[in-house]
Image: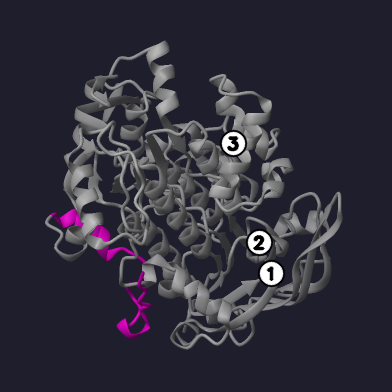
Amino acid sequence: MTHLQKSGEDVTAPLLEIRGLSVSYRTRGGAVPAVRGVDLDVWPGQVTAVVGESGSGKSTTAHAVTRLLAANGRIDAGTVRFGRHDLATLSEAELRTVRGARIGLVPQDPTVSLNPVKRIGEQVAEVLRIHGLATRRSAAAEAVAVLDRAGLPDAAVRARQYPHELSGGMRQRALIAVAIAAKPRLIIADEPTSALDVTVQRVILDHLQRLTEESGTAILLVTHDLGVAADRSQRLVVMEQGKVVEEGETRAVLADPQHPYTRRLLASAPSLTTARPRTPASAARTGASIDTAVDTTVDAAVVSTVDAAVDAAAPLVEVRNLVKEFRLPRAGGGARTVRAVDDVSLTLRRGRTLALVGESGSGKSTTARMVLRLADPTSGQVLFDGADITTAKGARVRQLRRRAQLVYQNPYASLDPRFSVGEVITEPLRAFKVGDRVSRLDRARELLGRVALPASTLERRPAELSGGQRQRVAIARALALSPDLVVCDEPVSALDVSVQAQVLELLAELQADTGVAYLFISHDLAVVRQIAHEVAVMRAGRVVETGPPEDLFTGPRHAYTRELLAAIPGGRLPSALARTTTN
């Protein structure tokens, strides 16, 4: 007898039944429809994945279930039946008895979803106390247990930390802990693993899968990662422009997609492709030796010659024996330190892409911050274009800011919401007093063209753009001063697969045109395989393996690299379903 049969729950009917759902957002220009007549079922003990591009309506559909839409959003039509309730018509008081206790939500963005002034443990304990699952005395200990179940290492230590003290992946796991604390019957997971490295992603998804198998928990999984959907869901729902265009058993949809949009999504998914698309290299800016770009149709022999010249050029960035230590909060003992970066040495040349990969907390972002002089190393050396910048301050750091820029992981939090797109892009030019107002706007229009956005975007604000559009704006801003180095910190992890493919292609084209070097931080080895010339695998602050992507994928030497490769989503598909792409 299953858990569901014991509990008396009807396994022959959907746990969640959506019929004719329509949702719109009020804007200055009138109502904008976001979801149009959606029908969707979620069954007990199953994972139903909803996939589609940014703006397809998948997150709006998920948030409409618990009526947690933005202030200007409203349900125009349809029913949302959960058990015997129509959630679309419940009062706010009635909804509060359902949210958290019977329906858990894992939101997409941990940066804005966790309270910045409360410790992580307090935020989980609050859920337990509100729903009568723990007393004030027992809540703290039980919160640590929940954090441990959600996969947070050193859960007792993490419970005493604030959100800003955790990595992006750790914050996302804290959100998952909040969602599962009350053991709800339905979990709505909106991009729950987009910020997680593949090994932690596997741990979290394994845990969610156990919930469905052991307790019959149903999961509505919103994801842009078709590899995750392929591995983990029983049913797949494909949305485009607010409508469901295809649905069915996951393997059936992936094996024989009927709609052209579904076929395009599958072709764009890096984890479901077997070949590595590569933009031909170009001549990079290497001082007086090379200063002209190579056309992408250039003869292969010329490309080979250019690559050899780039490799022979002096390094743009050298990291030598870099160490960074942090103090941890006291937890039942004396003060402790953690060595986040441990004796790391790296070299990055102009016109090349060096990818840092590894789990959350492996030291990738900390290393990049020290390269950019946003953090001071405990020991070691950082050289930029031959100059030692390890202890640079004042004017020397300001000079570095002109030549090295950063594209953040989160396109939703990295742009000032008060600025127009034009102001966002031209801000670096104003800060360094480059040009006048007219020339700066001309430069902004040129950059928008480079990132494939219309000039009309200049007048819009970040809140009016999709995630993919915001990340393109962030890239345009990073290029405003024509830097030699751009650090890309998980630049596509929050984007759906089709936009992700466009952004990666854009980065490769910009590198071919300008010779910019990328320090590319990612937990997604499928993405790294597409973009990088060299890969450094980091674990526990140390570099355990380096080499070209082809070598790491075909013959990884270190056990940890093999573990990362085995965790790439999409691997559970039969080989016949794998999509092969070519240049």
Instruction: Give the colour scheme of this rendering.
Output: one colour
Assign the C terminus to one quadrant of the image: bottom left
The residue beneath circle 3 is 443
- Tell me where residue 437 appears, x and y as whole percent: 67, 26
Q: Which mark is residue 241?
A: 1
Relative to the observer, which residue lies in front, 557 or 372?
A: 372
At label 3, counting other C-alpha atoms closer than 10 Å, the crowd grade (few under 14, some 14-19, many 20 or more) is many
| Front residue of this view, candidates 209 and 258 | 258
Mark 2 and mark 1 residues within 8 Å of each other at the beta carbon: yes
Q: Earlier in the sequence, mark 1 or mark 3?
A: 1
Of the image marks 2 and 3, the number of the one nearer the N terminus: 2
Residue at disc 3, secondary structure: helix
Whether residue 88 sits left or right of residue 141 in the image: it is right
Q: Position of residue 189 (x, y in %)?
A: 55, 61
Relative image position of residue 332 (x, y in whole percent): 34, 28
Q: Which residues are magenta?
A: 558-583
Residue type indicated by callout 3: Arg
Q: CA distance from mark 1 to mark 3?
A: 32 Å
Depth order, front residue of 424/18: 424
Judged left or right of residue 230, residue 469 is right
Dot 2: element: loop
